[in-house]
Amino acid sequence: MENISTTYTNFVLVGLVQMESLRFLYALLTFAVYSTSFFVSSMIVYVTWREESLHEPMYIFICGLVLNVMFGSSAYLPKLLIDLLSKNSTISLSGCLFQAFCMQSYAAAEIITFTVIAYDRYLAVGHPLRYSALMTNLTSQKLLLAIWVFVIMGICGVVLLTARLTFCGEDINNVYCETMSLLRLSCGDITVNNIYGITWTLLITVSPMLLIIYCYIKTTVICLKLPAEASQKAAQTLVTHAIAFSVFMVGTLFIVFRYRLSSSSLSTVAHVVISMSGMSTSVTVNPLIYGIRTKALRIRIARTLQKILGNSK
């Protein structure tokens, strides 16, 4: 075993160091991304809560998605903004683990929620007469709660296994923390971490993706057999969810696959660009997709904004 001369409990987010020369520009972009994501997500949640006509499983699941987006974006964008303005590039081990817990919980909850939405759309299109009995508002709320209980238990395992390690390095090639970056800095045995991490990753990626693809295919086949008007309405909803899911998965895969490349083949700047674009795209674009492409939400958001602007005059 190698002698450990120095162990670290504080880490340097190298991405923040790289951004210092243009930190005010990056701070402006960070604020724009966060404020846009938070505002659109808040409007979707607000109109869904206020409008009784939107008290349906599909809109409850959409609320679950955008609330999760608000949670995920709040886990790193406000801190990134503060760090850029204060020229701070360090983070403690406890802060790093907490941020990793929040961000990885967001990612896991998002993909499982997308899976439930795909199944919900399959039930709505494939079993319209039984849908109201198969998927009630209470059932949808219980499913969202079950998703978070499952995710928290799984991510707690990832974080606790990481917390027990000793770290012999301090440089994290990113602007936020995740457990994979910490594992690279560990000087102890990470076999258990790798086994648990791979098992968890396969559980929340492969199985959901297979189920999503199955539901999309089945729903598409059923849509082709429906009358033109009903088919168009069902297809539009399906396409909206498919686009949002694709945006999320592309961003997630960008982040995951950068770990497969060695540090020598991928510069720090590239690490930062990939991880930032992956996270920022999904938390910004997906609320916009649901707010614009979902007709009922779009109309009610527009009406709400008109009332707010009218009252302010």
Image (cartoon, helix red, strand yellow):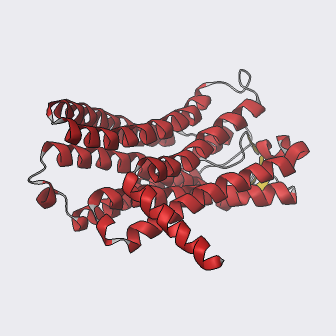
Q: Is residue 130 above or below residue 136?
A: above
Q: Position of residue 108 (x, y in %)?
A: 44, 48
Q: Position of residue 211 (x, y in %)?
A: 27, 37
Tally of numbered discs: 0
- Quadrant (top left, top right, bottom left, bottom right) of the C terminus: bottom right
Please give left or right for residue 169 compared with residue 63 in the image. Answer: right
Q: Residue furthest top?
A: 265
Q: In which quarter of the image is residue 99?
A: bottom right
Residue name at image x 65 percent, y 61 percent? 94
Q: Is residue 98 visible?
A: no
Q: Nearer the viewer, residue 99 or 227?
A: 227
Q: Nearer the viewer, residue 116 or 62?
A: 62
Please give left or right for residue 163 compared with residue 247 in the image. Answer: right
Q: Residue furthest right?
A: 21
Q: Where is residue 131 in the image (x, y as percent from the top left)?
A: 14, 54
Please give left or right for residue 13 compared with residue 146 in the image. Answer: right
Q: Nearer the viewer, residue 171 or 146?
A: 146
Residue name at image x 56 percent, y 53 percent? 103
Q: Quadrant of residue 51?
A: bottom left
Q: In which quarter of the image is residue 206?
A: top left
Q: Is residue 22 visible?
A: yes
Residue name at image x 39 percent, y 42 percent? 240
Q: Position of residue 289 (x, y in %)?
A: 48, 46
Residue name at image x 68 percent, y 49 percent? 176
- Quadrant (top left, top right, bottom left, bottom right) of the N terminus: top right
